[in-house]
Amino acid sequence: MQKILVIDDHENSRYILTTILQKEGYEVIAVADGKNALGCLANEYFDLIMTDLMMDQIDGFDIIDYVKKNTPGTEVIVITAYGTVPTAVKAMKLGAYDYISKPMQREEILYTVQKALEKSHLIEEINILKKQIKEECLQDRIIGNCSSMQHVLELVKEVANINIPVLITGESGTGKELIARAIHNGSDRKENPFIAINCGALPENLLESEIFGHVKGAFTGAFSNKKGLFQEADQGTLFLDEIGELPLSAQPKLLRTLENNEIRPVGGNHFVKVHTRVIVATNKDLKIMTDSNEFRRDLFFRINVFPIHLPPLRDRQKDIKLLANYFLAKYSKRFSKNIKSVSEVVYDRLESYKWPGNVRELENIIERAVILTKSDYITVNEIPLESQSHSVESFTDGPEQNNASMELVEKETILRRLEKNGWNKIATAKDLGIGTSTLWRKIKKYNLEPHRN
């Protein structure tokens, strides 16, 4: 449950905010002055602060300053009866996410809170990624000794510091996002954000706003200005996965951005300069799509400046054992197991399998095997590749499996992926390689809930 601190010296305002937010499932603590607020902030972590600006002794500006110095990942929404532009600008310059003027409207409160929390979560993900980059070089995780993968790695090195669009192609599960991250981490942008979005994961009416942002009043529910991902990734890299799913209506705007390094938010009248590198990926044949007018030809030529193609795992037979050992070590460490080896029979079976889910499927197969094994090595009993439905990657809508241990593995795998993705259903479904409707049914079947022990 996300925790919100409300600070307001007017009892009625505290009551209104507390009532509205608690009904939406938020945990709320409300205090009447800045002194009590600082006491709360010193002892507890809050996902969001909502503070009045004009208070005695310690005012809203002091609160913003304290939060940004001590818990910079926490967003602040200011509440003011003095809804003037200078007051709002001062608060925003100090680091406030947005402001709400009194009298407050329920819809505006909830919308602003939701967007502030989304930004907070995004910043948290960026910080986690930066920490991961410091702990290990992501390029070292690109496993492959075969000639085709060595060629890919050479291309990554060549293009990393050249600010041109990169088009990564390959089947689902071949590691397109990993290659995009490797390009970013090998560039001089590596200290800045890497933000990824799946162009097929959002409805058409939301995707354009998500990528380019919108201005207040652009459409129903647009209660405040919203930065798009191009601005969030400014000076960094924006990875547009499944670019073939980008609606035709949004393609001219992307083309203009790539050509002029500027975006125009939905509903806006002015262009905003951005310095964001763009990497795109697809598992479709964009050339065929341009021939059938499903994808703009001029945009295709603009993003196809530096293509990188990832081979399917079935064409990387020499890498399968290498990858299996890497994932074995990774998940043995994660689950605190001392698994020393994989039987040669298993290796033979892995190398003869066709891997329709590619590297992602292999990783999930090994992860599940590590969970299942009761000994210090993996046998064919933990990797029954004869049945495609046994792959964790291949959840289906068909009849449920009768094997209780398989259901336990499926349940725990889904729960871990949900927690990893902050209970984002779209991201989790993509991670598992299943549809969102299938994921919802699995969540209901296993009665999964956030923060479940």
Image (cartoon, rainbow, N blue to C red):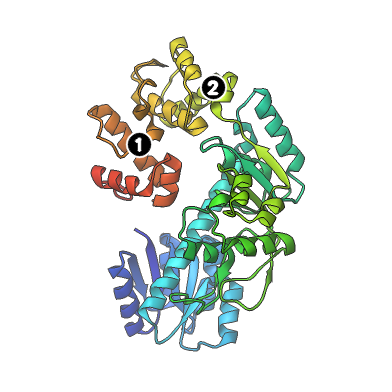
User: Which quadrant holds the C terminus?
Assistant: top left
User: Which quadrant holds the N terminus?
Assistant: bottom left
Amino acid, disc 1: Phe
What secondary structure is found at the residue carrying circle 2?
A: helix
Residue at 31% across / 67% down in the picture? 24
Q: Nearer the viewer, residue 366 or 419?
A: 366
Q: Quadrant of residue 232?
A: bottom right
Residue at 43% across / 59% down in the picture? 45
Judging by the rendered image, the residue that carries numbered circle 1 is 395
Q: Nearer the viewer, residue 246 or 164?
A: 246
Q: Quadrant of residue 438?
A: top left
| Residue 302: x %, y % from top left | 71, 53
When the figure is inspected, residue 50 is found, relative to residue 328, above or below; the finding is: below
Residue 233 visible in the shown view: yes
Q: Nearer the viewer, residue 47 or 370?
A: 370
Q: Nearer the viewer, residue 338 or 98?
A: 98
Q: Disc 1 versus disc 2: distance between alpha carbons? A: 22 Å
Judging by the rendered image, the residue that carries numbered circle 2 is 320
Left or right: where does residue 208 sit relative to residue 381? right
| Residue at the extreme front of the image, as rendered | 292
Instruction: Bin the neighbour count of mark 1 within 10 Å (Cα to Cα): few under 14, some 14-19, many 20 and up.
Output: some
Sequence-first disc among 1 and 2: 2
Left or right: where does residue 322 sit relative to residue 274? left
Amino acid, disc 2: Ile
| Residue at the extreme top of the image, as rendered | 344
Residue 186 visible in the shown view: no
Residue at 24% across / 43% down in the picture? 445
| Residue 148: x %, y % from top left | 67, 27
| Residue 117: x %, y % from top left | 45, 63
Number of the label disc, if any, that sits on residue 151: none
